[in-house]
Every structure is written in C-alpha cells, then in structure tokens.
Amino acid sequence: MAFSFKLLNTDNKTSARRGVVSTSHGTIQTPVFMSVGTFGSVRALDHVDLESIGVQIILGNTYHLYLRPGASILTERGGYHQLIHWNAPILTDSGGFQIFSGSV
C-alpha cells in the first residue's frame, strides 16, 4: 500500500484541516499528537500501553537510533517496528538538529 492523504474537512475561518493519512502500517487521523520514541522507545510506556490509550503513531529520531541501539542491532532485529514490537505507523526525522547542535 502506498502512502496517501485524504482531506476530510477544512475550517473556513482558519484554514485548519482534518484528514486521514494511510500507510502500510495503518491509518492516522490528523491532526495528531505523536509520542516520541527517543533512542527507540517511548519512555515509561511499552507498546501494550501505547495501544491501550489509542496512540496512532510514534515519532523516532534517526540520529538517536544510530547512536543507540545502532544500525547493526536494528538490522539484526528486523527494523524499528520489530525492535519495539510496534505494528502501527512510525514517523522518523533525520536528527539533523541533534547532529549539528551537539545535543543528544
């Protein structure tokens, strides 16, 4: 399945939009709050907790994943989804800010 976005509503006063993003791992109602999976996990919650509270997508940082657990472990475990036992969508950012700012 390819990535797609379907616009459901647009507010005439503010131009705010509501829609549905479809991915091969599931759908996401937008706008959405994304839990952040720093270093490959959402702190203090596991995948069962996230599913039980209706989390639709998590955000991962590619640079953090590169540092820990590292590319070889991600490959060994079959990718990010398999590593964290998460079958729903994941959005990853590049980690460019962390790389260039020196913050980890």
Image (tube, grey):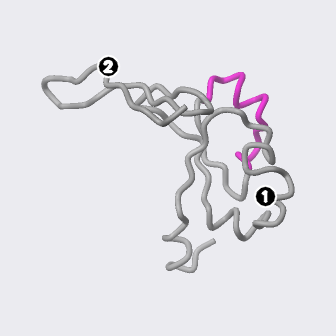
Magenta residues?
A: 41-55
Residue at 42% over, 25% down: 20
Q: Taking 88 as reference, is 71 above or below it?
A: below
Q: Main secondary structure of the magenta part?
A: loop
* Circle 1: element type: helix
Residue at 50% over, 79% down: 100
Name the amino acid, label 1.
Leu
For disc 2, the marked residue is 8
* Residue 44 falls within the magenta-colored stretch: yes
* Circle 2: element type: strand
For disc 1, the marked residue is 74
Mark 2 or mark 1: whose residue is earlier in sequence: 2
User: Percent position (x, y) of residue 90?
Assistant: 61, 43
Residue at 51% over, 78% down: 101
Name the amino acid, label 2.
Leu
**Snapshot quadrant of residue 51:** top right
